[in-house]
Image (tube, rainbow, N blue to C red):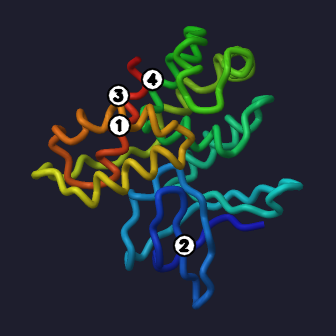
Amino acid sequence: MYEFFEGIIAEVTPSYIVVNVNGVGYKVYSPTPFAYKEGQKAKVYIEQNFSDNNGFTLYGFQSQNAKGLFLKLLSVSGIGPKSALAIMAAEDSNSLAEAIEQGEVKYLTRFPGVGKKTASQIVLDLKGKLGAYVGRLDRQDTLEQDASVTPELHDALLALLALGYTQKEVDRITPKLEKEDAETADQYIKKGLGLLLKK
């Protein structure tokens, strides 16, 4: 129904953004909400999903290709919107494609909500279909690095919890993140996901 929204980012939370389009606020779930800033004018590519439990839910992405990857993940049996967002939030699409191409089931089980059976299904359904496609995904420009800012780290930790990681897992990596030279919540999230996926 919706292809994209173009409007002002009215609110940014750890799991979703609110896009003000001509005075109407749309709640849009995003894999990288902190890539947006409140007050910013943005174009958000939309996918609408319906479930019996939640009714209609909107998911938003910074590019058509990112939206396409989300749809490919959703096409896999056992992958729902929340799991697809968590996988995409890692922001390393090339590693994801490589893991699928090489059949690295163990790597894929590190994402929240992805067990061995689902990981095997991802490989079965998407192997050979993501290589060139994922390589075209838009990437965030690296922002200037400066001293870490506590509110940004706090927002990043909330976002990791919203993606499905446990409090224990987040607490384990918090001391390491405190030592990281990051400036934005989005940077902390990427670093945090890197640490969580290493174990």
Q: Which mark is residue 18?
A: 2
Q: How far apart are the alpha carbons under marks 2 and 1? A: 24 Å
Q: How far apart are the alpha carbons under marks 3 and 2? A: 29 Å
Are discs 1 and 3 less than 8 Å apart at CB?
Answer: yes
Are discs 3 and 2 less than 8 Å apart at CB?
Answer: no
- In the image, what residue type sits under mark 2? Val
Q: Considering only vertical position in the picture, is 107 above or below 40?
A: above
User: In which quadrant is the N terminus drawn?
Assistant: bottom right
- In the image, what residue type sits under mark 1? Gly
Mark closer to the chain start, 2 or 4? 2
Q: Considering only vertical position in the picture, is 90 above or below 110?
A: below
Label 3 SS: helix
> Circle 4 is placed at which residue position?
95
Q: Considering only vertical position in the picture, is 126 above or below 6?
A: above
Mark closer to the chain start, 3 or 2? 2
Q: Which mark is residue 192?
A: 1
